[in-house]
Every structure is written in structure tokens, then in C-alpha cells.
Amino acid sequence: MGFSMGLNFLLLMAMVATNILSLYHLSSTVQSPKSPKAPPPVPDELLRHLHTIRATINHLQQSSTGGANPATDTASTKPNIPSDLLLYSHISPIASSCHNHPDLLHKYMSYTPFTLCPSDSDLSEALILRGCHPLPRRRCFSRTPQKPTSSLPHNPFPASLPDSNVIWNKYSCKSFDCLNRQNPNLGFDPSREISKFTSYKSELDLPIQQLLQLVKSVKSVLRLGLDIGGGTGGFAARMKLYNVTVVTTTMNLAAPYSEAAALRGLVPLHVPLQQRLPLFDGVVDLVRCGHAVNRWIPLTMMEFLFYDVDRVLRGGGYLWVDHFFSKRIDLENVYAPLIGKLGYKKVKWATANKTDAGGVKNGEVYLTALLQKPMSR
């Protein structure tokens, strides 16, 4: 049934694309008698989209018949779809996930072309978090703040962030001060973050100076890094002071994390944890998994995440699992073996009891690990 729905969806897309192409030809050929010029060529992008849709439909049709001629094959032939693809389609943001949320997708794509985009950016956030990356609104203009500041600080730890550079409509708080009053640990006061990643209080901590010394001791180097779920970019800001470029994945969950990171002169990548990391293979020296990567992530999704981390890390690069928490028995039986599948060298592996009320009650522990990818495979 899911296969049929996917095929129907692609057929619908093909029909829409064909109609658009036909309208384009029609509109380009309707000319005045005084304009005998030939119609302009069809844009390459439109043709590529149409060819891609048609190729996908042909592939699905061939899969449904086992690659044979449907006229000569039996009707009982079952489709041969890779199990990994079926699994991935349930947890990753590919088009099939959008079928489950047609109301949100319809609302998101209902707008007036050639005008300002609706001020409902929380809709795209909701779709992304549900595994559906919505199509961009191709023909409306993105909104900007009413009175943004003309200059921004170069210091990644400014005394404060300018409220006027954020569109606050969708948030309950209307200023960074409000967010800081609600929770001063969210990272919206950069001056409070200046001491993070610099001190050593327990075995779970890995100060940046120690990290750099460990890397230097094996004649390696840190130049490029990725901080997964890095919030307002505190780690990237600290590494910037050591001439290490770190980009941060963010989601604007009830607060403008992406805008805050950008206001600090950092690069926020607006992607969820289940998405393929938007980086090429083997190009970064360090990937840090902080508070966002923890036991609440479904196990299969976490496995995909770690293998994608392996994809973007260069040989000899480092994976830093920072304060990962879970039940002790799950760490021993589930998560440690999962991380162990990567075959990385353990540079640091430290565990300690989670001492807050919930952690003690649930028998939870923290894990901090620094792991080095093999130079070659």
C-alpha cells in the first residue's frame, strides 16, 4: 500500500510538472503580431526536475515488476526494494514522510506568489521535525526584521545580542533578556558562556586546551569541525578563538537559536538530527555530539547518525561524545556496543553517575568519549 501511495504521489508530481512545462510553452508562444521572435528555451532546471520525476517513476515501475517486462512477467512478481531504503524512509526527511502530514504541508505551501512569505516559519520547523523537508517557497520574499542593526560585533562573546535582528512573532519571549530570565543556561547570554569548555571539574570534562594537546601529541591537526545540536554555538565560538572553524546544527525550538548563532558570527545549519549531514565525505577534523544527542533518539536513527558522522570525518579525525546520558545498563548493553561498531580508537572514555534527582532515580550515567577514526580502511 505504501509503495502504491508513493507511486501515485510521483505520478501526481509528474502530471503537475508536465502541466507547468506546457503552460510555460504556451505562455512563451503567445506573442503580439509585431514580435516574431522565437520563444525562449525551457529553463534547464525545469527540464531536470521533469526528467528526475520521470526516471524515478520508471525505476519504481521496474522495481514493482522485478526489472522485467510487465507485459511478459507474471502479476504475482513482488517489488524488490532494499530494506535499508524502506527503513530510512520512515525516519529520514525524504518525500515519503510528507504523506503523513498533508495538512501541515498544504498550509505551508498555501501562500500568495510574488509577495512577502507568510510569517509562519514554525510550520517549516514542524514539518522538518516530522521527517518532511518541505519544498522552499520559490516565489515569495523572505521577511526581515523591521529595524535591524547596521553593524554586528566581531567578538563571538559579545555583552549582549541585538533584539532588533530577530523576528519574534512566533516566540512567547520577545527579547533575549526574556529568554535569559526564563533559563540563563540556554546560551542566549554569550558573556555567560565565555568560561565553557575551558575548565576541568571531573573526568567527564574535556577542556579545549586538553583537546588540542591530545591532537598535537599525535601530530594531527584541527581546522574544521561540526557541532551537532550546538544551540547558540557556544562551542563554535570558543573554537573560533583558536582559529578552528566549526559549524553548528540548530533547530529553532521555541527560541531563535539559529539567529543567535549567526549574530555571534557563526554558521548555523538548520537541520534536524535525522537528516543527512550537509557536508561532503571526509572533510572535517572533529565532530562533537553534545546535549542534543542522547538517549531520547530512536536507536536506529542514532545508528544512522553515527555512520553519517563517520562519513564526514576524515581519516584520523575525532568524534567527541560529550556528556551523553542513559541508564547504566543501556550504556553497557546498547550504546557502547553501537559506538564500538565504528571501530574507532578510544582516546578518552569516562563515565560517571548522573547526580540530579531524575538521574539518581533512573540509574542514569554520563559518558564522555573522544574517539579517533582510523587513518585508512
Image (spheres, rainbow, N blue to C red):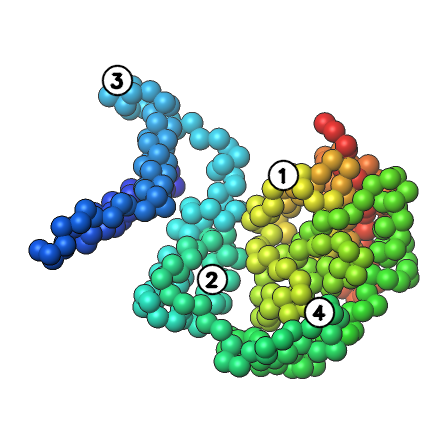
User: Sequence-wise, which precedes: disc 3 or disc 1?
Assistant: 3
Instruction: Give 273 or 217, whichever is nearer the viewer.
Output: 217
Residue 182 versus residue 36 in the image, above or below: below
Q: Which of marks 1 and 4 is in front?
A: 4
Instruction: Give 152 or 184, whichever is nearer the viewer.
Output: 152
Judging by the rendered image, the residue that carries numbered circle 4 is: 154
Q: Where's the N terminus, which quadrant?
A: top left
Q: Position of residue 210 (x, y in %)?
A: 89, 52
The disc at residue 324 is none
Residue extending farthest to the top is 72
Circles 4, 3 touching at the beta carbon (< 8 Å): no
Question: Which residue shows up at 50% across the image and 33% down it?
Answer: 83
Question: Which residue shows up at 46% across the image and 72% down it?
Answer: 143
User: Sequence-wise, which precedes: disc 2 or disc 3?
Assistant: 3
Circles 2, 3 touching at the beta carbon (< 8 Å): no
Tell me if 5 is positioned left or right of 362 in this view.
left
Tell me if 22 is positioned left or right of 298 in this view.
left
Alpha-carbon span between mark 1 and mark 4: 30 Å
Question: Which residue shows up at 74% across the image and 44% down it?
Answer: 285
Crowd band around label 1 with a 10 angstrom C-alpha radius: few (<14), some (14–19), many (20+): some
Q: Quadrant of residue 8?
A: top left
Residue 275 versus residue 119 in the image, above or below: above
Judging by the rendered image, the residue that carries numbered circle 3 is: 72
Instruction: Give 299 or 15, whichever is nearer the viewer.
Output: 15
Judging by the rendered image, the residue that carries numbered circle 1 is: 281
Q: Type of residue at label 3?
A: Thr
Judging by the rendered image, the residue that carries numbered circle 2 is: 124
